[in-house]
Amino acid sequence: MRRYGTIAVITLCLPPALNAQARVMSDPMPPHAQESRYAGARLMRSGIASQFDSLGRTPLGHMGDSVTAYLFTYNDQLRRVVHARIASRQRFQPPVSWRSACDEVAHPGWFFNLAPASRALFAVVVPGVFGQPAVNELPPAARSGVWQFFHAVADSSWRAYLAFRKPATDRASEFMWRDFWGPKDDARFSLIRMFGLRGTEGRTYTAFSFAMRDDYPGAPNTARTWVVDAWGYPVASALGNIDLYGTVADGGGDAVVTSSGLIRWDGTQWQIPPVYSEEPCLYHRTMPLPPGAHP
């Protein structure tokens, strides 16, 4: 009865004219995947958590697993942290026509019923039990060291952007330059919020995400999420821009709480959650389809 009740609640949350086209299926019980440790979900208005997962292979948890919900108000202000368990989960498959909607049910994935249930203006749900995110100091040389790599990306992005936009006059080109590079001529590097990150064996890292403000339809995507070492050398990178909220203790090191899930150490390298879960409407342009996925 709980399963059918959950499906009924989910169905009520869908666009009324399209309910009949959506499919909410029973749990296919995929085997555990390592990528599930980095996954993230969002709370819908109903309080049900929705996770993007095109192939249905990496749900953030099984029934009975613990999760942490970060509940936010306006302006990314964290209101409270809630620890819950997954009471039930279903696989969700929308029709292809929904992909242009760019909302929380426009993509295939999972629906999770959590206990206790929570509601918030915006909330991120991640696998595991974590506390309040903290903002750690950066390694002393990280920001200055990463500048050379950031500038190389910015310069390459600017050239691609200029070729894409093809300004007709010098004045238009100058306007584009000021818009792209910003008042400090640094592509707004000085405004990027960075987070210190404890790794294993006493090593320190820095995590941050940025976008070059040039992501127009059809333009090259220049948004990035990076983890860099203590000297600013990038050790992990993903296309796309996500919000970072802070770090939480994760075993012997830290994990970063983001709007797409967790940035975590897997024993050999830093893993960044798929950015297309943050921006489903930019899915095809931001990241390639995974093998076996059908648009």
Image (tube, helix red, strand yellow):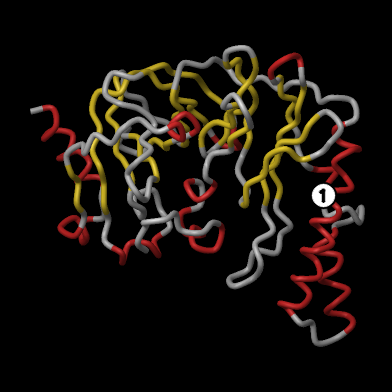
Residue 112 relative to residue 102: left or right: left
Name the residue rendered at 34%, 41% in the picture. 57
User: In the picture shown, does residue 170 fall above or below 36?
Assistant: below
- The image quadrant of residue 230 is top right
- Residue situated furthest front in the rendering: 268
> Is 274 in front, or is 192?
274
Q: Position of residue 260 (x, y in %)?
A: 52, 39
> Is 88 in front, or is 203?
203
> Is 80 in front, or is 21?
21
Count the labels in the image: 1
Name the residue rendered at 63%, 12% in the picture. 252
Q: Position of residue 150 (x, y in %)?
A: 82, 49
Name the residue rendered at 75%, 27% in the picture. 205
Q: Dot 1 lies on which element? A: helix
Q: Position of residue 250 (x, y in %)?
A: 58, 16
- The image quadrant of residue 115 is top left
Residue 183 relative to residue 268: left or right: right
User: In the picture shown, does residue 53 fall above or below 219?
Assistant: above
Name the residue rendered at 31%, 66% in the picture. 97
Q: Position of residue 155 (x, y in %)?
A: 84, 62
- The image quadrant of residue 17 is bottom left
User: In the picture shown, does residue 251 fall above or below 243?
Assistant: above
Looking at the rendering, in which quadrant would you find the N terminus? Answer: top left
- Answer few, some or many: residues within 10 Å of disc 1's Cα (few below 14, many 20 plus, some between 14 and 19): many
Residue 164 relative to residue 158: left or right: left
> Is 283 in front, or is 237?
237
- Residue situated furthest left in the rendering: 1
Task: Read off the residue under disc 1.
Answer: 150
Residue 62 relative to residue 159: left or right: left
- What is the three-letter code of the residue carrying label 1? Phe
Looking at the rendering, in which quadrant would you find the C terminus? Answer: bottom left
